[in-house]
Amino acid sequence: MDARAKPALPPGFPREISRETMAALPIRRYEGEVVLVENHRALVRAADDIGHESVVGWDTETRPAFRKGESYLPSLVQVATSRAVYVFQLKAIDASAQRFR
């Protein structure tokens, strides 16, 4: 597949949204559960929930870099399922495969 090719979307699915259309959308607040994954039990729960989803939303947070060549690893990952949002503070947890054995 050509790396520049845009992925196929279902027919009728818009590729862009105008500022006007975005401004007309209702403002919603997430009312589901937010889980801070800070121990093994929460990690196992998150892994089980995420593993049962066909689609998840995710986002990362990384310390900004202001100098050329400077970069940092992500420090936080948020993963959203249909049931909950899981917040992983990466330096605070051991998510290695050995912990799941």
Image (cartoon, rainbow, N blue to C red):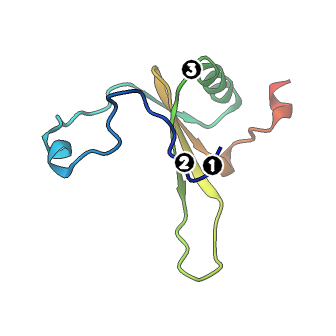
The residue indicated by pointer 1 is 2
Residue 13 lies, with reference to residue 62, above or below; the image says above
Crowding at dot 3, Cα within 10 Å, few <14 / some 14-19 / many 20+, comes out as few
Residue 44 picture location, percent across and down: 68, 24
For the N terminus, give its image quadrant: top right
What residue would you read off at disc 3? 53
At x 14%, y 48%, the residue is 20
Binning the other alpha carbons within 10 Å of mark 1 as few (below 14), some (14 to 19) or many (20 upward) gives: few
Which residue carries the number 2 mark?
5
Tell me: residue 91, above or below residue 32. Answer: below
Q: Residue at x 80, y 38 (%)?
A: 96
Q: Is residue 57 above or below residue 2?
A: above
Alpha-carbon span between mark 2 and mark 3 = 27 Å
Distance Cα–Cα, label 3 vs label 1: 28 Å
User: Disc 1 and disc 2: Cα gap in Å?
Assistant: 5 Å
Q: In this orientation, which residue lies closer to the viewer: 90 or 70? A: 70
Tags 1 and 2 in contact by the CB under 8 Å rule? yes
The residue at the far top in this view is 52
Image location of residue 21, percent across then percent down: 17, 42
Assess disc 2: are there few (<14), some (14-19) or many (≥20) residues with their C-alpha within 10 Å of its C-alpha.
few
Q: Which quadrant of the rendered structure holds the C terminus? A: top right
